[in-house]
């Protein structure tokens, strides 16, 4: 019998077996991967509900503007409703047009990739890309990547089950990198366009989506040609899938890319000095508070904390503008003042040598056992560098030694403004420019306060029954010191004789009047008053404190002066309102400490005394040159050799203080005319307040100071005041002089 032909159905079965085997194998591998038998352990349900990503902690102003971030990756999450429809359309058109129709894996796209051997793209859905971004590290081998791919399929399906399409899309945009230290769509839109994700137009959306393929290659700031070409490809995809029409496509692709590029960095933005001081305090807070989700202390750089502060972004901007405007001018005068003259370090070379020893270069060379000769040579070798000037950064060539000398010439500034009632700090300027001068002159820096310390002594006098109109002879007072020496303070104008009211004495900072009061009370009661009003810096109990010898911070001084405007209640300057976790749960509220430091009448009398400073004393330029007509109390201060200039200004709604001086006290103006606090510090306060009052949205009042609830027992009109003894001579114990 002839041999029978093999059945055709047998070949059909064989064909389907061969075809099915890969799919069976894949299913088997998927099963093993899902159970964790191969590859990394898959994320748990809790992991999927709380996907891990490094989230920047945000610092917010009281008017709800982000003024800074702390991060390892500059990433802040957004919700779907925070995204521009243009961005969503560009993303779908370019990365996953069937996003709304698949369940995490696009089989159509996968088959296309298989049959075209990868030439048609990777076939990954947005969900798969999200899974990759969230849960996988870089593979060590091709096999690792194969296994990861399989795991991504499983995770993608799980993500699709647990999240809506909108949530997945938002999560994806929160996880991607956009170069220039921008992670996530919110950081990217701020970095490249200076706006939020919901404000993106079509072409801006196309630029950012185009970057997803290769963030550095298509960076619009660094590679504009590549970016433009890629942007137009995205636009063509949007046109292909009818997200934009032909007319829109033709007109938009012809437009240039307009950037508002500023790479987010701690060195830039508002309140840089404040943010650095705050950072150190937040790190301490994190160590003491456990994140329940992780069981570990909070991480400032990755846990996405929301830090709400009292800083007002507009007032902060005005303070920084005022500082820059004045410091630019005063530095110009300072340079002209010293031009052609022997420099301070010529007589005091230790300024430079001590400065060298504090530099990173010197410390590193010493650690490497370099000789003094080698160090000296390195400091004299010229190198390319960028230096700070008040007209902008300048690229130049200087030796490190020349650079050190150059920066020693700069005057610095510390300024703080606060609400005296609530204690809320509204503005904080710790220096000229944080990029070049890292030291904070508001809270960290402490300098001799000069005559701004005298109000504590006058407060003591008011509390002990004196009045602003009380007259004191303008004569020198001598103190016997424990060393056996004698000390007799002199007036800056060397003028003596006659009688002066306390109001006149404080208004014109007459040292003999302060010396008289110190003779009556002694140092310790003055220190006690200062302590009750928030001064914590060390103070030696010596008579010289009546002239302002202690070193005190701007932060302390502004807090202390707020006592006068707050009816005798000292309120601790507060700049931290509350901390929330990434989900908006309040972790801690912060309430400032309040202390009744002096009585209400004393506080009001001191305001009256210090109003004299502005009416006819050392602060009179506020009325003349700056045209202020509202209620202002204040005090100027100038230390020995004009090393420090101060001004403390009080209005019913704001208390602000300013210090100006060089890093080294030996560097200063040589004359009081140029170096007094009324010239160096007070203009910053004046410029700031002009800007604040001009902003109607801030609604800062120009009301009078509120008098005490009970009637005053003191006459404030010195023209009506009659002191015992008429001439005043009988009112004084001459043995005290």
Image: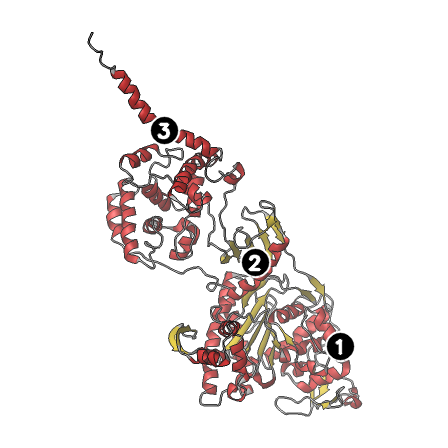
Q: Which callout, 1 or 3, points at the residue further toward the start of the chain?
A: 3
Mark 1 vs 3: CB contact within 8 A: no
User: Where the C terminus falls, by quadrant?
Assistant: bottom right
* Few, some or many residues within 10 Å of mark 1 (<14, 14–19, 20+): some
- Going by the picture, which residue comes out furthest to the left? 2
Q: Which callout, 2 or 1, points at the residue further toward the start of the chain?
A: 2
Say which of 391 and 3 sits in front. 3
Q: CA distance from mark 2 to mark 3?
A: 58 Å
- Look at the picture and state if 692 lies above or below 342: above
Coloration mode: secondary structure
Q: Which mark is residue 23?
A: 3
- Going by the picture, which residue comes out furthest to the front? 1
* Few, some or many residues within 10 Å of mark 3 (<14, 14–19, 20+): few
The residue indicated by pointer 1 is: 524
Q: Which callout, 2 or 3, points at the residue further toward the start of the chain?
A: 3
* Few, some or many residues within 10 Å of mark 2 (<14, 14–19, 20+): many
Residue 115 x/y as whole percent: 27, 34
Q: Which mark is residue 309?
A: 2
């Amino acid at each position: 019998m002839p041999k029978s032909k093999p059945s055709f159905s047998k070949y059909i079965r064989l064909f389907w077996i061969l075809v099915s085997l890969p799919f069976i194998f894949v299913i088997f591998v998927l099963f093993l991967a899902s159970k964790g038998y191969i590859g990394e352990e898959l994320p748990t349900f809790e992991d999927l509900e709380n996907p891990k990503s490094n989230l920047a902690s945000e610092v917010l102003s009281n008017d709800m503007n982000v003024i800074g971030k702390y991060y390892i990756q500059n990433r802040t999450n957004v919700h779907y409703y925070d995204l521009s429809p243009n961005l969503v359309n560009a993303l779908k058109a370019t990365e996953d047009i069937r996003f709304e129709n698949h369940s995490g894996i696009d089989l159509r796209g996968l088959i296309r990739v298989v049959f075209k051997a990868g030439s048609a793209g990777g076939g990954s859905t947005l969900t798969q890309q999200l899974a990759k971004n969230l849960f996988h590290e870089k593979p060590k081998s091709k096999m690792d990547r194969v296994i990861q791919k399989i795991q991504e399929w499983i995770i993608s399906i799980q993500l699709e089950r647990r999240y809506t399409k909108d949530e997945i899309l938002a999560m994806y945009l929160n996880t991607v990198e956009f170069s220039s230290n921008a992670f996530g769509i919110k950081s990217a839109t701020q970095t490249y366009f200076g706006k939020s994700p919901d404000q993106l137009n079509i072409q801006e959306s196309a630029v950012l989506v185009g970057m997803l393929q290769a963030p550095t290659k298509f960076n619009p700031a660094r590679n504009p040609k590549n970016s433009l070409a890629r942007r137009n490809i995205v636009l063509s995809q949007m046109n292909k899938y009818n997200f934009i029409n032909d007319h829109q496509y033709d007109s938009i692709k012809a437009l240039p890319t307009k950037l508002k590029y500023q790479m987010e960095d701690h060195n830039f933005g508002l309140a840089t000095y404040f943010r650095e001081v705050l950072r150190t305090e937040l790190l301490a807070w994190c160590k003491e508070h456990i994140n329940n989700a992780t069981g570990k202390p909070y991480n400032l750089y990755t846990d996405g904390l929301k830090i709400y502060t009292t800083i007002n972004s507009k007032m902060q901007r005005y303070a920084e503008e005022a500082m820059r405007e004045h410091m630019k001018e005063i530095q110009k005068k300072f340079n002209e003042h010293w031009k052609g003259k022997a420099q301070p370090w010529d007589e005091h070379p230790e300024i430079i040598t001590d400065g060298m020893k504090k530099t990173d270069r010197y410390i590193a060379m010493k650690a490497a056992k370099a000789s003094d000769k080698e160090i000296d040579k390195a400091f004299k070798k010229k190198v390319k560098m960028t230096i700070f000037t008040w007209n902008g950064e300048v690229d130049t060539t200087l030796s490190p030694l020349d650079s050190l000398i150059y920066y020693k010439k700069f005057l610095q500034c510390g300024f703080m403004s606060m609400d005296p009632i609530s204690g809320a700090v509204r503005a904080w300027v710790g220096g000229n420019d944080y990029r070049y001068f890292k030291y904070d002159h508001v809270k960290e820096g402490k300098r001799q306060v000069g005559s701004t310390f005298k109000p504590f002594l006058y407060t003591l006098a008011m509390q002990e029954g004196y009045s602003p109109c009380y007259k004191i002879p303008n004569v020198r007072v001598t103190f016997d010191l424990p060393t056996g020496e004698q000390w007799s303070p002199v007036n800056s104008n060397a003028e003596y004789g006659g009688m002066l009211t306390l109001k006149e004495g404080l208004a014109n900072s007459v040292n003999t009047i302060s010396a008289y009061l110190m003779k009556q009370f002694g140092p310790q009661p003055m220190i006690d008053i200062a302590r009750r009003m928030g001064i914590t810096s060390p103070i030696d109990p010596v008579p010289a404190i009546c002239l302002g010898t202690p070193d005190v911070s701007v932060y302390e001084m502004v807090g202390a002066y707020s006592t006068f405007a707050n009816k005798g209640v000292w309120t601790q300057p507060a700049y931290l309102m509350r901390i929330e976790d990434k989900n908006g749960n309040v972790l801690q509220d912060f309430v400032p400490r309040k202390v009744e430091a002096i009585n209400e009448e004393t506080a009001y009398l001191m305001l009256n005394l210090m109003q004299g400073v502005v009416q006819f004393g050392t602060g009179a330029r506020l009325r003349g040159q700056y045209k202020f007509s509202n209620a202002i109390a204040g005090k100027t201060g100038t230390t020995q050799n004009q090393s420090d200039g101060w001004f403390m200004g009080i209005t019913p709604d704001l208390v602000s203080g300013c210090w100006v001086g060089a890093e080294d006290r030996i560097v200063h103006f040589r004359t009081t005319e140029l170096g007094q606090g009324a010239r160096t510090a007070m203009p910053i306060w004046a410029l700031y307040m002009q800007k604040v009052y001009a902003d109607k949205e801030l609604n800062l009042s120009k009301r009078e100071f509120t008098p005490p609830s009970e009637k005053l027992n003191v006459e404030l009109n010195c023209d009506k005041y009659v002191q015992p003894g008429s001439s005043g001579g009988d009112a004084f114990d001459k043995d005290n002089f």
